[in-house]
Amino acid sequence: MTRTEERLRDALLTAASRVQDDALRPLAAPERRIPEHAPRAASRRRTWLPPLAAAASVALIAIAVVAVAGYLQHRNNAPAPTSPVAGPPRYYATLEGNNHTDLEEVVVRATATGAVVTRVPDPVSPLPRGTGTAAPPSSTATPNPNASLMQPLDIATTDDRTFYVVYGIQTVTGYGDLVIESFRLSNAGQPSPLIQVNGGQLSGQGTTRAGGSWVNPRIGGFAVSPDNGKIALALKASSSSTTSDEILVIDTRTGSHAVWRGGLDRPNAAFAILGLSWTSDGRSLAFLAQWCSPPQRAFSNTGSDVCGGATRSAQVRELDTTSAGGSLSSARLLLAQSARYPYIARALISPDGTSLTAILLSGPVPPGTGLGPNAPERLSVVRISVGTGTVTATFFQGVDPVSVWSTLTADSSGRYLMLTHTDVSLRPGDTRYAVGWIDAGHFRQLPLNPDGQPVAW
Amino acid sequence: MGPVSDGADVSASMISALFRQHHGDLVRLAVLLVGDQPTAEDVVQDVYASVHARWTKLPARDSGLSYVRAAVLNRCRSVLRRRGVASRVSLSFRAAEETLASAEHEAMLCEDRRRVLQALALLPCRRREVLVLRYYLDLSEAEIAEILGISPGTVKSTAARGLAALARALGEQS
């Protein structure tokens, strides 16, 4: 073997050895589009078909070229096409407690292994107002003893690389201002410095009604449009500005805000907005509207607002965010609770807006666990056609005695779903969640199971 | 390596088993051709999805791995073609730097290995593929010929030209 061959072999083996089997993103089985029992090659051979198909192909190509050219002319600001790759996102992010500081922080983990890829230090508070400048990570800045704490409250992503975080500026009386920051991961999982989003400073939006000792952050949902152009927050009722949940949409290009509030309130019922999701064009925003009667909230935290043993009804609605704001009642009704769908726990709109992916609960109601409400224990994740209201696919089915706490997150393609639900193997009263993604009807639990939610991927 | 007419002995589960068994090896092969692990993982996932979707037309079981390796090579070729030569080199450097910067617990590639890999990345696709199959997978000329769909003689001459080019780039006498 020559010297060149020796050097080549050594370099190749060394480079290849850096790839560790246990750190690989798991392979995902694709959906089979052809029905299992479809007649295959059963039709007679049609000798006239090839020439006809060739002629039709030429015509279609010409039409497609014209259509694509026209489309490109009118969509200069269209979002970058999503990756054609069929695999699940490589990374996901959660909010988790730091053992050293006892504070929550953003943690990015690898989907394949659950291993921590990076921890994003909380920014120093308070951030410079109105400058839009990046806040340095706390690890590189001198701590200000007079500064209030910055705590992450919710997180969202448009892919598995760009993440957005809502931070609350925590004071002794609760959360004052909210600040939205973003960071991006390199291919190697290294985070960029946090950058404050244009229009991402929200004064006095941080607390709910303090009707007792609870002072909860006002975030009920958080989602970023696929083109990164709009950020939506579901803000919970506060004593100072609103008496009912509302939706705030930030245009990150102009920094302007639009608010939708009112119009869906019902007498003697507590109204809440759970979960937000965008269509791929960044125009439509879907949300789950929930009414609890009589008004009684057993517990409320980020992205979860449940009815404590009360009568519950829900609807999924679609908001046209191209207007300057208005009433929530202007949102189009996509799906309503009914005998067929007695409990719609969560719902996400598909990128093309033609279907919903929902967590539906049904079946017997288990005895109270003391954790919150009683809800049907049979959990299913399904796709529902917006046009017909029928279930067109079932992705997952399981039993969960406290399934009302389940959450659903989709990746940017809408193909891969991250589900959190209660681990039924645990003792009653243990609130630890099983977090995993759904693959061909199976729940693939993450190797290292974070207790935290929400999850962004 | 002709297609099976009915594919009765090839099932989707066998395809899955084949990929799961060789997942790491396939990613490593792709890494050596495209230069970074995320893209390599995407390549293998794409091939898996593609093969899974049309498993009834796949070749016989005993040559399944060769078929899959060939599919990975084809997919890598497409990725590199899209990148273009200039960006390919640039990306290759950047990916190597990112990987090195993040993998503190792993041994860093020495400068010599880096130079070899960069020189390899500059070779034409076919030569690079032959060299990787020959010197990483230790495949025979006949096996490489089967995967690439060329004659053993072409494999031999391509490897010789590739090594000569590599030696020139590294300042050696071949």
Image (cartoon, coloured by chain):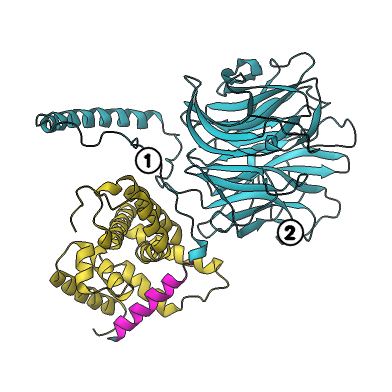
Chain colours: A cyan, B yellow
Residue assigned mark 1? A32
Residue visible at 90% across and 37% down in the picture: A213
Residue A130, given in percent of the width and then of the height, sits at 70, 39
* Front residue of this view, candidates A384 and B7: B7
* Front residue of this view, candidates B173 and B56: B56
Residue assigned mark 2? A141
Compared with residue A253, is residue B144 higher up or lower down, i.e. above or below?
Answer: below
Q: Are marks 1 and 2 on the same chain?
A: yes
Compare marks 1 and 2 and give the one earlier in the sequence. Answer: 1
* Front residue of this view, candidates A319 and A202: A319
The mark closer to the camera, 1 or 2, is: 1
Q: Quadrant of residue A47?
A: top left
Quadrant where the image shows the N terminus of chain B = bottom left
Give the residues in magenta.
A3-20
Q: Quadrant of residue A231?
A: top right
Q: Secondary structure at mark 1?
A: loop
